[in-house]
Amino acid sequence: DSGVTQTPKHLITATGQRVTLRCSPRSGDLSVYWYQQSLDQGLQFLIQYYNGEERAKGNILERFSAQQFPDLHSELNLSSLELGDSALYFCASSPRVRQNTEAFFGQGTRLTVV
Amino acid sequence: DQQVKQNSPSLSVQEGRISILNCDYTNSMFDYFLWYKKYPAEGPTFLISISSIKDKNEDGRFTVFLNKSAKHLSLHIVPSQPGDSAVYFCAASASVSGGGADGLTFGKGTHLIIQP
């Protein structure tokens, strides 16, 4: 158990809909990272928050957004969903600003868009 | 444009022998490299990392070697055990100007199979 909790574990929704994925980091970790793992792309960095502020952006679509709340949990919002958004979405947390040492990943949320 | 490449999608090794997983990168700004292990239905688990100022880092059965001139790193597992069967991801990190942070750039993974 990494100590990072992601909910829900599975999500099935229709194209055009909007969903929210939730991540609770390990106790004391200030950084939260979101990654997308699709079948042919491997793990792709989406966005990072550190202590409530956005710190880095990767390959995140404009239809996607995230935030980190005062209690440090984070939510990833995906809107106007397309079939190609079907993927595993992972959250990771670390105590530091930079993810250059170990970071702890949750079990992921499997999103299926039909 | 894949900046971190793991050219072997799978690797089969006999139990007790050495497993060598390879990774190549193209971005000269990467200064930290990590290996993660992933079992099905679980998130990636951190294994070992290495800074670009070093050429070797060892932790128990796991050793990572970095060849900066060749932009190549490898993970050695000795001896290989059945529980090592998993997908291994190579990842790299680059510092961002202004002291900012950056996410990891991952390879597509190598599925290691340890045969009894």
Image: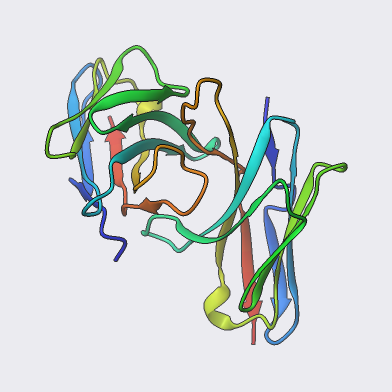
Q: Out of B39 and B97, give the one closest to the viewer.
A: B97
In front of the other: A114 or B106: B106
Q: Give the residue drawn at x 63%, y 71%.
A: B113
Residue B16's x, y, as percent? 70, 87
Q: Is residue B9 left or right of residue A12?
A: right
- Which quadrant of the structure image shows residue A111? top left
Q: Is residue A43 found left or right of B62 in the rendered image?
A: left
Instruction: Name the residue rendered at 70%, 47% in the picture.
Output: B6
Q: Is residue A60 above or below residue B90?
A: above
User: Where is residue B25 drawn, in percent x and y?
Assistant: 73, 38
**What's the residue at 24%, 18% (across, down)?**
A79
**Most extreme residue toward the front, as rendered?**
B98
Q: Is residue B100 above or below residue B57?
A: above
- Applied colour scheme: rainbow
How many discs appear?
0
* Residue B110 spot, x, y in % from top left: 64, 56
Looking at the rendering, in which quadrant would you find the N terminus of chain A? bottom left
Q: Would residue A35 be found to the left or right of residue B36 on screen?
A: left
Residue A15 quadrant? top left
Residue closest to the eye, B25 or A21: B25
Q: Position of residue B33 (x, y in %)?
A: 63, 48
Which quarter shows the C terminus of chain A?
top left
Residue found farthest to the top: A62
Residue reaching furthest right? B69
